[in-house]
Image (tube, grey):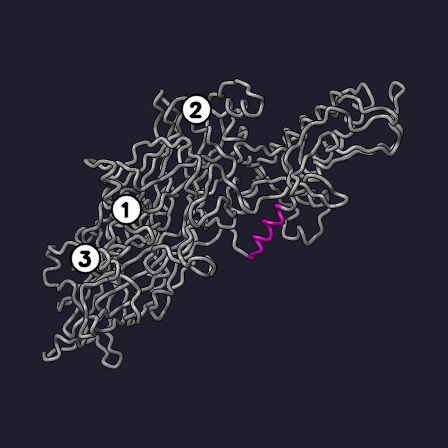
Amino acid sequence: MKKLQLLAYAGAIALLSTGITACSDDNLTQEVTPSPGYNPETNEVNADFVFNVSTGTGSTTRMSSENVQAAITSSNEVFRGIDNAKLFTYKIRNTDNSGVKDGWHIAYAPTPTPVVKMFDLGNVMGRGSIAPASTDKTKSRRVVELNLPVETNTLLFYGKAIKDGTDVTQGAVDMEISANGNMNANFFRLKKIIADGSDTQTEFLQSETLISAVLNKIIRSSYALPADLTMEGRTIPSGRSVKWQDYVTITRDGTDETKITSIVAKTTEPVYPSGESAPAMKALGEILANTYVTFNTIYVRNSQSELRAGSGPAIKRMMNDLYTTIAAVRDASPTNVEETMAKRLAGVICNNIATCFDTSAGCEWKANSNLKTFTELVDAQVNKIGDDEKFTDFPKTEFNLPYGATILQISYNPTLGISAPEYSYMGAIPTYAMGGSSGSTSAFDPSNWVYAPELMYFGNSPIRVTDATKSTADYPDGTTNWVDNDNSQWSDWTDNSHVKSTTRSVAMRNCINYANALLRMNVKYGTNVLKDNNHQIQYERNNGANEPDNVINVQNAGMFQLTGIAIGGVNRSVGWNFLPRYDATVDGTSGEQKPKFGCMVYDSAIPDGTIPTATGPSGGAASAYNYTLLWDNWDDDLKGSAQRVVYVALEFKNMSGKDFWGMNNLIRKDGTFYITAKLDPDAVSVEGKTAQQVIDDKSLGITWPDTYEMPPYYTTDQATADGDQTLDSKTIKERRVFMQDYMTDVTFVLTENSLKHALVAVPDLRSTQISLGLSVDLKWNKGLVFDDVKLEGGQ
């Protein structure tokens, strides 16, 4: 993780004026000359608010990098600008109110808040208006005139990067800033991908209802004889009917009649001539029976249920397989009445599939109008779904959700007149190898998917003052010069002071920094062959069958492609200091009033997901970088102990041209799957330190700022508890996976056994017990390194 001084000034701010007057305790007996800009009626002075930036302009095809300004000081990326800017001026005073307390930043929300005034600066800097890496100093600054209250000694700044892209590419945040300075009321809240109570949510739920209804009508296909059927002297009379489910025996739980415990193929025919005993199942009936079992059985392995993919592409592939198998029965030449009934039933099944899917094009979805007519759902159940739309890419394109967010389940509907298995979508996704962690469950509600945060700015600083009048060119250029007290341009300034009657110019002492954490990641192969889970699956499902694992040679190009990344354990809301906060509006009022860390960010804006081919047994080079903005994941309850582990899931597309077995699912060719990894802030290596020393000293591995303090800040009580009052308002130096204004650098490694942990659903990444399939090289620049930790099925 490295300091994100990508805007080299990182937001250096100055407040310039032709004169500022204040009346503070240390100059009451002095004769002073008020500034010409001073207004004694308002006790304010007209001042210039100046940003000093040192960052290149131009365009880039690395849109993900450009959106987060990840390489703005070393490439031609464009500065995105700043809007929604807010500036607060404060008069921090001594606890006994004897005078101003200079040289302090806001460390915690005081009561009452000593805010003097808020400036709504709006769009304070336009896109491309500054060039952080430029030597053109006139272009590196922006001046805004303000009426600055006197005796100001601390400034607080908020801002967003100008948004000219989508929520998917540039994030989405609701920003609430209290105009009266009540910092406890300030929050920045991630937007849900599907907002509660929205038309989009209704459309999403209706889409799941419609797809489920299609599947249910297909598996409930039946055929009734319109006339007597006679072959070789044997007759099945007119009116006799057969359902597809009649070819199997469905067993239900004794205490829950909706729970299916098994589906087994029958060994005798379900329909045959009257007066005869049920004959042994014929060949065509056997195919129908076995197909029904395979299609509708949700396998359970080690008490963990298979997760059945419910995305549009997954169902299309599933239907194409089903159609191919059933069409073979439809097109067969029967040799007896039982096989004729099976053939005709197969024709009905094929016709039902063809009503909703284009069987001449690999079972591509047909328009939703066809599905509505086929299922006969009432208008209120489907009125938000467009007739001309298709579920081709559901739920990704229409709803911006990962394919793995939609998982099918099957139960038994005992309602009179139905009495049949029934598909529906899970409202909460169960996960594998999960015992659950404190405060979380072993299921993830798809409604908790959120967009990544927007690029945000945060400044919290005391001030410098001078009696000399300054122009823009008189200010240091760039972050290094700005924070250097020995810089000659600061020679006639008073550091850590407050506005006085003789003050002419004011500068924000510290820099404005990024308020976000930034994840930079890529992926590579750690071997030249990947093995699937075929041996274990066949052993468990086929009475100890001994088959080898299938092998995929990744020295061949284009075997797998990275298509997205999901980051778990995200707290939806952060407070005035951009640290996780309890938010009753989204967290509810039941339980402990603490941050829940219950959301997941999904980033599908991958600029280039190509994984370079392996060049030998040790693998190959890493893919291009992808960048994801996040919140700091500091947990105040874990101060002094290990901070939160973060789980991530990488989304891949299987482009190997062959199916393979994942954890307990078949991952189809061209299908999407997920592999998880764990980022542990304590499982790192630091040069010259043992593993235990790293665990014991939470500050190791981070290059902490030495010119200013960053959140989280020690409160007075925390400093007292640690036995050192000098820590009050200082940085709590405890590393964590994601830290605001720092970049976490991760290389994920696909190892020989990674595919054995492949899932078709996104797992609950909040859990402390997940089956892991990726090796991780996680490093903070300047020291902290995770050396390809093997995470193959570990906890």
Cβ–Cβ below 8 Å for labels 3 and 2? Answer: no
Q: Is residue 149 left or right of residue 253?
A: left
Instruction: Name the amino acid, label 2.
Output: Leu
Percent x, y for residue 752? 41, 25
Q: Residues within 10 Å of mark 3 (few under 14, many from 20)?
A: few
Q: Position of residue 708 (x, y in %)?
A: 21, 55
Screen quadrant of the N terminus: top left
Magenta span has 593?
no
Write the start and end of the magenta stretch as one range: 197-208
Label annotation for residue 530: 2
Disc 1 target residue: 735
Which mark is first along the chain, 3 or 1?
3
Q: Split into 4 quadrants, where in the image is the C terminus?
A: top left
Amino acid bearing label 1 = Arg
Where does label 3 land, which residue? 724
| In the rendered image, the vertical position of residue 405 relative to residue 31, given as above or below | above
Tag 2 secondary structure: strand
Q: Work out whether residue 709 or residue 524 is closer to the camera in this orientation and state it.
A: 709
The residue mark sitting in front, 3 or 2, is 3
Report crowding for label 1: few under 14, some 14 to 19, many 20 or more residues within 10 A (C-alpha).
many
Q: Amino acid at mark 3?
A: Asp
**138 with respect to 421 (left or right):** left
